[in-house]
Amino acid sequence: MKSIDIKKVIDRVEAFPTLPTIYTSLLEVTSNPHSTVQDIANVVMQDQAAVIKTLKLVNSPIYGIATRVTTISKSIMFLGVNEIKNIVLALSIIDLFSHSNENINKYMLEVWKHSIAVGVITLILGEILKIGNLEDYFIAGLTHDIGKLFFMTYYVEEYSYLISKVYEENLDLHTVEKETFGLNHDDIGELLSKKRKLPDLMQHSIKFHHKGGMGNNSDKLVACVHLANTIAKCMHLGKSFENEIVQPDYEIWNILNFPVDTSIHLLRDKILAVYQKSISILILNKE
């Protein structure tokens, strides 16, 4: 397959659609210290599709809320302003990546399953580590592979062929992406996240999910996404379309400092339980 001019790829990133008005309105209202919970809820309620999708995610097993949440204002009370803002952002990003091509839809479905798994595992790892504020954890895991989704949406035939080639010839996905587009999906994800001014931690987890850190030992979220990505691959939850499962970066063990009594079997069982229920709601649209 002929390689694609890197300038054309970057131009396509530059032309990537802006995030919906609802998110920019949310940024504005949440930056106002005088805004109330109802003010913030009113912004979300201007978009009924966003309300339905947000409540579906809030009521999923991911967040483990014991009682059913029926309003955006109650969602904010349970999860906080920042997490609701993140959910609206993530759902907006998901809506930007869609394509009618049947073959690429099959691939995209598997990437979304993998991404949901990484989000679920990232959140569970944060709970095990007793991190007080778990805002950003699920959403950071969910959005880590947006670079792949960009390729699948805007380079349908090329990326479909690329995935087939990677599998048939047992090649490294990053290498083939670089040879074809001049950039791999990590690079594309970084460009997209900066272009659309995504939250810093989300940018970092997109950029470093294969590396595990930013050159310091302070970012546990990035380390959790990195480890969750590996665990999801080992458990075959969705597909990342990367043939090789690479050992997690050694430094993340120093960053995360796992409790010595962590049970791998209990961890696996919890991941599977939450993942399977989440897939049925978020992918299969079953209540």
Image (cartoon, helix red, strand yellow):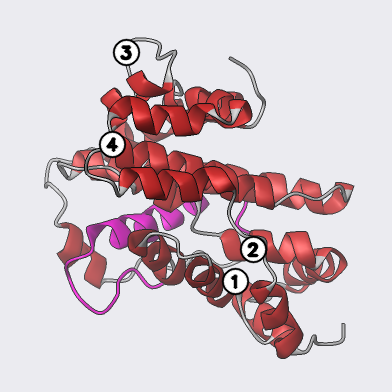
Task: Locate residue 120 relative to residue 78 in the image: left or right.
Answer: right
* Residue 215 in magenta stretch: yes
Task: Locate residue 239 relative to residue 168 in the image: left or right.
Answer: left
Tell me the residue at 12%/46% (across/down).
259
Q: Dot 3 lies on which element?
A: loop
The quadrant where residue 182 appears: bottom right
Report the magenta residues as a range: 211-240
> Label 4 neighbourhood size at 10 Å, few (<14), some (14-19), many (20+)?
few
- Give the distance between the C-alpha atoms of the residues marked 1 and 3, in whole angstroms: 37 Å
Mark number for residue 148?
A: 2
Which of the two discs, 4 and 2, labels the residue nearer the N terminus? 4
Q: Where is residue 67? Give x, y as percent.
A: 34, 10
Which of the two discs, 3 and 2, labels the residue nearer the N terminus? 3
Q: Nearer the viewer, residue 132 or 124?
A: 132
Quadrant (top left, top right, bottom left, bottom right) of the N terminus = bottom right
- Give the distance between the C-alpha atoms of the residues marked 2 and 1, in whole angstroms: 5 Å
Q: Where is residue 236? Give x, y as percent.
A: 56, 46
* Residue on which the image places disc 1: 185
Q: Where is residue 165? Give x, y as percent.
A: 79, 71
Q: Dot 1 lies on which element?
A: helix
Which of the two discs, 1 and 3, labels the residue nearer the N terminus? 3
Task: Locate residue 193 relative to residue 247 in the image: left or right.
Answer: right
At label 4, which amino acid type do we have? Answer: Ser
Residue at the far top: name it. Answer: 67
> Label 3 neighbourhood size at 10 Å, few (<14), some (14-19), many (20+)?
few
Q: Dot 4 lies on which element?
A: loop
Tell me, yes or no, whether the two marked residues, 2 and 1, touch with CB atoms within 8 Å: yes
94 vs 182: above or below: above
At label 3, which amino acid type do we have? Answer: Ala
Q: Where is residue 181? Give x, y as percent.
A: 72, 82
At label 2, which amino acid type do we have? Answer: Lys
Mark number for residue 66?
A: 3
